[in-house]
Image (tube, rainbow, N blue to C red):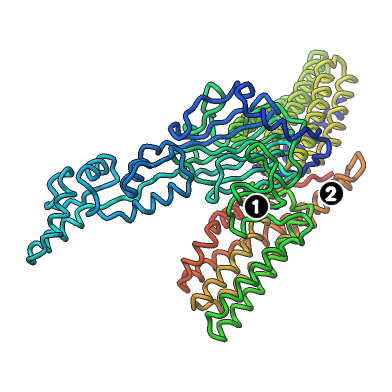
Amino acid sequence: MRTKILSIAVMVMFIMSMIPLAFAEEETTTDDTALETEPESTLQEIDSTNCWSDKPDYTPGVDKGFFIWQGTCGKFWWVDWSGDTRAKWKRWYKIVKNTEPTTDEPTSDEVMQIENQAAATDTTTLTAEETTDLQASGDLVSTGSSEVTGAQTVGTKLRDKIANTGTDTNIQTAAKVKTALKIKKPKLLYRVKGTITSNGQIFDVGLRKFDARDKLVYRPGKNVITFHGWVGPHFDRIFFRTTGDQVTFDLEFDGKKTTETVYIGKDKEHPATNPFTLTGEPATKKVCPVGKLIYEKKCTDKVAGIAVTPNGLAGSLADKEVPVAKGVAAGQLNREQIKARLQERLSKLPEKAQNRLVALNEKRLERLNKLEELKAKPVFENFKKELNFKARKLNQERIKEKVQNFERAREKFKQSRDAAKEAHQNFIKTKQELKDCTENCDELEAKTLEEAKTFLTNTADNLIEHLQQLKAKIESSEDISDSEAADMIAKIDAQIKELEDAKAKVTAATTKEEVKEASKTILNSWKRIRNHTFYHAAKLVAEKHGGIIVKMEHLSVRLQKVLEKMEENGKDTSTIQPLVDDFNSALESAKTSFEQAKAKFKEFVDLPEPKGEPGAKLLQEAQQYMKESRASLKTAQQKLKEIIKAVKDSKGSNELTSTTDEEAEDAEEAEDTEDNTETPSQ
């Protein structure tokens, strides 16, 4: 028994030497054929007061912010947003139109028209009453001229001074008074933006009060809605249904992402964070067919006179914002548009510059092809641009909670590791004493047995806390999809239970033979678990790395666009393109090695149990490919820094800022993918 316990001790110390891991946020497609279809006439009832028992009580055009609730009829989610500039809009309308407005709820285009006219208003056209009113509201400010003695007489003074221009002194005085006041551009609209994500399919999307300035993108069969628009003395609305029971909202009002401008349910509660997730009732019935939105209680392919594309698109979006429809070759629409625009630009350049611009444009089309190829590959398909190149979007409060769980698990792991080391030392000491004992050794024999049990129990605790760390990290990771996370967590839970059972056997052991059998159980459990543990840890690091590769591929296209703009503006790009080529070459190497690593991970998953030495070998090979991919990505990152410096040295900062405002973040994130995960050996 002594020999066997010693072998277990050696095994556990080896395990503990390998355990430290590198713990350094999915748009899904779903099938709606399972949804029941109900008649379009049901839309006449969904917004009745009987269906809105949980609707926040607010006054449109007066209360400012987002108002969110789920209706009881049809399980529609409703999102309204409202401004509070009604009085201000009426005041400016009266000033620029010389009459009272005929509506209390103008469109955003009508508001913008008044805003632009107000901004162009000269102070000489204002009456004294208007001047006083605007100065009190802060829309009219003085530059501090001593010629201006009071807001109530400014309008009259201006007209009198400018009319009496018979002398140089009067002309000078009039000029001083004119420059003494400044009309600030009135802010009559608030900018609103948002992304809505569900853990199920989103369908039956509807709009209210949308016009040409408001934009929405929704692709049938997906689980994400994005929108942005303007709101002032009125309100706008989006509503939808989903098969999921959780909906995450990421909302921005007037350029700020706060919780104070978000009101949930009839109690108008503020969320704890923004983004935030709400739980509701899933919907099982649909009304509108694919490609149509709900507008004015009808399924339609037009919203406010604007056609809805087959992708469920509303608003006067730029071409670059239009998603490619299914059945259209990936990237085809963008390429055709790029070529068309190129022809317009070439006509403005001399022949040599035309040739250079054509060559640069071909480079960009080549990178677009690479990007579309990458997006079509299964190993990269989870990383979505609209999710910031993550595989899923988690509630920030949930992430915070899981990170705290990870920190607690890490602390417990350290404590259990220290306890296991101490127990090991005590066991070795007692074992030696027993070995040296020549008579009356029963007490030492019993003590050795207890020390062995303590050591094995602490060892099991250490392994369990190690798995708890890994589980908490998976739960807080946005780099893996929901299905992958669920599968990994289920396996870890099973492994924890296996170790808990082994620990119970150790605790219950009363004889040498029972301790020996319990030690075998722990050893065999770890042999089965070890490879899976390293696989889960390595996969977390790898998936984060994959998202960065996709992000850098998007950046590659933008870099080529920077060079095109520079060339078009007469700036030299001859020394920069080779750097971009080096960047692309390193990125290609990173992609190739990453795909090879993912292939090895898949081989590991497909390997029958127990995976043993073949599994360990596959993980070692995968890790080697990951090291190569990280090295290539770091090379690309270094080239990126050189490119940015070269562009700035060539006075291309304006072009760089307008097209690659994420390069610093990309570079920093590339450096953060170091993987210290050690691979298992048998």
Q: Position of residue 42 (x, y in %)?
A: 72, 30
Quadrant in the picture for residue 560: bottom right
Reply above or below: 318 against 39: below
Residue at point 81%, 45% (across, down): 681
Q: Where is residue 60 in the image (x, y as percent from the top left)?
A: 48, 32
Three-letter amino acid code at disc 2?
Lys
Reply above or below: 69 against 226: above
Reply above or below: 540 against 510: below
The residue wearing badge 1 is 307
The residue nearer to you, when weighing 339 against 364, is 339
Q: Where is residue 162 in the image (x, y as percent from the top left)?
A: 15, 59
Three-letter amino acid code at disc 1?
Ala
The residue nearer to you, when weighing 106 against 470, is 106
Q: Earlier in the sequence, mark 1 or mark 2?
A: 1
The residue wearing badge 2 is 602
Q: Which mark is residue 342?
A: none
Quadrant in the picture for residue 339: bottom right
358 lies left or right of 330: left
Q: Which residue lies furthest to the right in this view?
A: 608
Quarter of the image for the N terminus: give it.
top right
The reply to whether residue 188 is visible in this rendering is yes
Reply above or below: 313 against 457: below
Q: What element carries label 2?
A: helix
> Within 10 Å of the Cα at label 2, are there few (<14), some (14-19), or many (20+) other Cα atoms?
some
Quarter of the image for the C terminus: give it.
top right
